[in-house]
Image: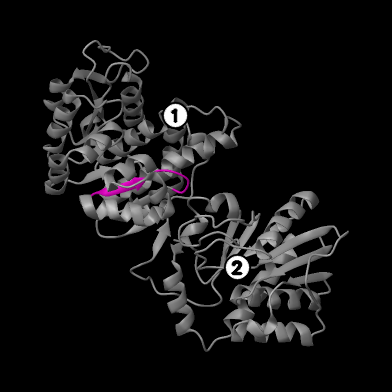
Amino acid sequence: MTLLYRTDDIRRIEAAASHLPLMQRAGRAAADLAIQLSSGGAVLVLTGPGNNGGDAFEAARLLRERFFDTYLVFAGKADALPKDAKAAYDRFSVAGGTVLPEIPDAIRWSLIIDGLFGIGLKRDIVTPYSDLIESANTLAERDCCPLLALDCPSGLDSDTGKRHGATIRASHTITFIGAKPGLFTGDGPDHAGAVSVATLDLEPSDSQNAGSLIDRTHFASRLRPRPRNSHKGTYGEAGILGGAPSMVGAALLAARAALRIGAGRVYLGLLDEHGPAIDFGQPELMVRKVDGLFAAQLTALACGPGMGRSAEAQAVLAKALASTVPLVLDADALNLLAEDDTARKQVNMRGAPTFLTPHPAEAARLLKTTTAEVQQDRVRAAQTIASGFHAYVALKGCGTIVAAPDGQWFINPSGNPGLATAGSGDVLTGIVVSLLAQGWDPLAALLGSVHLHGASADRLVAQGLGPVGLTAGELIDSARSCLNSWISRAD
């Protein structure tokens, strides 16, 4: 399991280990990775005015010791460096290293190292450092060479994944002590590249503030073969409410996903009175009018895909909130919830678990703020919704955030831009309600669903079927294949 630490947590860990040579260890870890990445030609090292620059001085010194043609650029003042970084600067100089004020011309680079700014950045980077960032990005592209960021790509907020002006586009990031959330959500994945963690021989405690990257260990206990002596009733009854006129497709996608992810029975309640009585693409679905669905003996319910925001939809939401089974709210159910204080109170009073799966704009409506504010700190936004509604939350987007009512938080590393397509969220809703109907624990169900949803898209891309032009319907069978392969491997 990969834990995620915000800047404040890392600072506390560093303070507790201040008697150890952490900067030298970071420099050595960086140099070791740099040697693997470099083709053996010239290496450009960019150093900044803080301790991240100190890590880069250490890495540059060690690369020179190993006979790499190393060019170090430092645009700051040595006397203004923090104590440990100044000591690293001095070690580099005593070892014969030369500090350059700017990037030399007419050299082809085999590797560029970004040691300008690390964690804790909260403001836009200005010249001369912004110019160095733009040059590094341009040179890495020109020379087709790796660009290695130390701890965090310069310009990226390590806590939130927000860019602060000019930002390094790294091919690789080596992050120290523990992983940082900003590397895996928001703009992070587009700028961090392949992320590796160098613990510096520390073993940080499992801080109550730490999050974690979602992987199969979070729901491994549920990945077991089905017993031969079972029947459809063993795997639950899932209900899907939605499908107003002209939006029936959204509800069909969710219902088909719920069935193919293993729910024993799936009931589909359509708001469109002229909607189909049967899904000819999936005739196993039991299509009902809304009242007929509520009459079924459900073990989990989803409400919202293609539901619209009519008075009828509002009444359906109220009835769903009064149900006593796990309830997934998505799409227009979230929009209606955001507008209705009575519905908000109903959510908080529910005895069964509630799940909210907003995209950033829906999250903004729930929080009565703007989409931009939500994206400023996606983890905080998800946690605020989870605590405010006493619900399990999946804030969708690049690096989907999962937050639990008790404050736990997670970031999903699976998935790709192929998920940015109409109906993708409806498929996720179907997966969640299916696993809940089958008896998965609330948190495991949401973590498993989000990770499986992303993995299904990754599998399709690996097969050459995306990301461009990937459709939501294609995700369903891919998700089924992924889930069965996970169960097979676990067995």
Please identify, in this view, whether the residue under mark 1 or under mark 2 is nearer the observer.
2
Work out whether 422 lies above or below 244.
below
Residue 247 in sight in this render: yes
Residue 38 in sight in this render: no
Q: Residue at x 81, y 70 (%)?
A: 70
Is 67 left, or right, of 448 in this rendering? Answer: right
The residue type indicated by label 2 comes to Phe
Q: Position of residue 351 (x, y in %)?
A: 12, 47
Q: Residue at x 77, y 65 (%)?
A: 44
Magenta residues, start to end = 391-399
Q: Position of residue 52 (x, y in %)?
A: 61, 73
User: Quarter of the image holding residue 352?
Assistant: top left
Give SS at disc 2: loop
The disc label shown at residue 117, or none = 2
Q: Position of residue 187 (x, y in %)?
A: 53, 50
Quadrant of the drawing holding the N terminus: bottom left
Give SS at disc 1: helix
Q: Residue at x 52, y 57 (%)?
A: 183
User: Quarter of the image holding residue 325?
Assistant: top left
Q: How much space separates mark 1 and mark 2, taking CA atoms?
A: 44 Å
Q: Residue at x 69, y 82 (%)?
A: 78
Work out whether 234 lies above or below 290.
below
Contact between marks 1 and 2 (CB within 8 A): the answer is: no
Per the image, the residue denoted by label 1 is 477
Question: Which of 363 and 3 lies nearest the eye of the viewer?
Answer: 363
Work out whether 282 lies above or below 88.
above
Q: Is residue 84 magenta?
A: no
Q: Earlier in the sequence, mark 1 or mark 2?
A: 2
